[in-house]
Image (cartoon, rainbow, N blue to C red):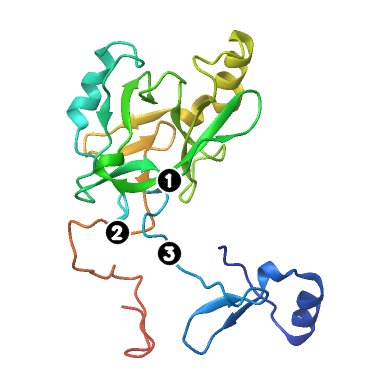
Amino acid sequence: LTLRPGPINEKKRSEHLKTSNYSQRFVINEDGTVSTARCSNLVLGLSYFPKLYLVDRMSPNRAVFKNVDALHQSRNSPGHCDAEGIKLELISHPTYAIAPTSARIVVRFGSGYMKLGLGSEENALRVVYRENKFIIVSCNNAILSQKLPASFAGNQIIAIGSDRPNFSEGLIMKFLLMSFVWGKWTEFSLNGDGTISPLNAPHLALGFQVPNFSNQRRVPILGHTYDPLHNNTTV
């Protein structure tokens, strides 16, 4: 769901209704829910296990990882096919971890991806951290990656790799994919505060659509809170 500026007068509104498709039309239901104009049986909502995104590194939505020292030490572990791997468990969201939220989705050139998000510790990804890449412990070279080739808050984090064991489509294709398609969008830094950032964007970190669970008290951020029912000025 993306918010965009709406029409500023009736003429613009009429033009907007003629040119826009139903994906941009919503209705407010009597029970307070919001549906698309075409599918009134569907309403807006939030996933119980939200997807993994880039957020501001100081955001309460950031993911803070438990096994930071073990991840650093995994640089010296055996090859990732044989390594046990370190669970991506969270301090910020106790009893939860980074886990797959979809099956492998095959695209082209023998490569595919998986969606990632907040999940139970039992389903946690196991990884090793080498050469600025988080390699998922398996034999298909799956690694963490930004979904879009740009580092910005809101960019989704996924796992990409080959759907064939050991990247069997050949060394040339492997080189092209790793160097030009994925390249720097798969490089991350493991920070001292327990967060993980894109190597080229240290002000961002992995996170979710929900704040951390370690502080249940929701404290408003001064300067960014406005309640029209209680005051007419910004706090």
Q: Which residue is mark 2?
A: 211
Q: Of callouts 1 and 2, which one flags the residue occurring earlier in the amino acid sequence?
A: 1
Mark 2 residue crowding within 10 angstroms, few (<14) / some (14–19) / many (20+): some
Q: What residue do we see at 42% from left, 37% from top?
A: 201
- At mark 2, the secondary structure is loop
The dot on residue 101 is 1
* Residue 57 visible from this viewpoint: no
Q: Of callouts 3 and 2, which one flags the residue occurring earlier in the amino acid sequence?
A: 3
In the rendered structure, the answer to whether residue 47 lies left or right of residue 65 reads right
Mark 1 residue crowding within 10 angstroms, few (<14) / some (14–19) / many (20+): some
Q: Amino acid at mark 2?
A: Pro
Q: Amino acid at mark 1?
A: Thr
Residue 117 lies, in percent from the top left, at 39, 47
139 or 88, nearer to the observer = 139
Q: Nearer the viewer, mark 3 or mark 1?
A: 1
Q: CA distance from mark 3 to mark 1?
A: 14 Å
In the rendered structure, the answer to whether residue 131 lies left or right of residue 191 reads right
Q: Which residue is mark 3?
A: 46
Q: Quadrant of residue 35?
A: bottom right
- Residue 179 position (above or below residue 38): above
> Dividing the image into 4 quarters, which one contains the C terminus?
bottom left
* Residue 175 visible from this viewpoint: yes
Q: Amino acid at mark 3?
A: Leu
227 or 23, nearer to the observer = 23
Q: CA distance from mark 3 to mark 2?
A: 13 Å
Q: Of callouts 3 and 1, which one flags the residue occurring earlier in the amino acid sequence?
A: 3
> Dividing the image into 4 quarters, which one contains the N terminus?
bottom right
Q: CA distance from mark 1 to mark 2?
A: 19 Å
Tags 3 and 1 touching, CB below 8 Å? no
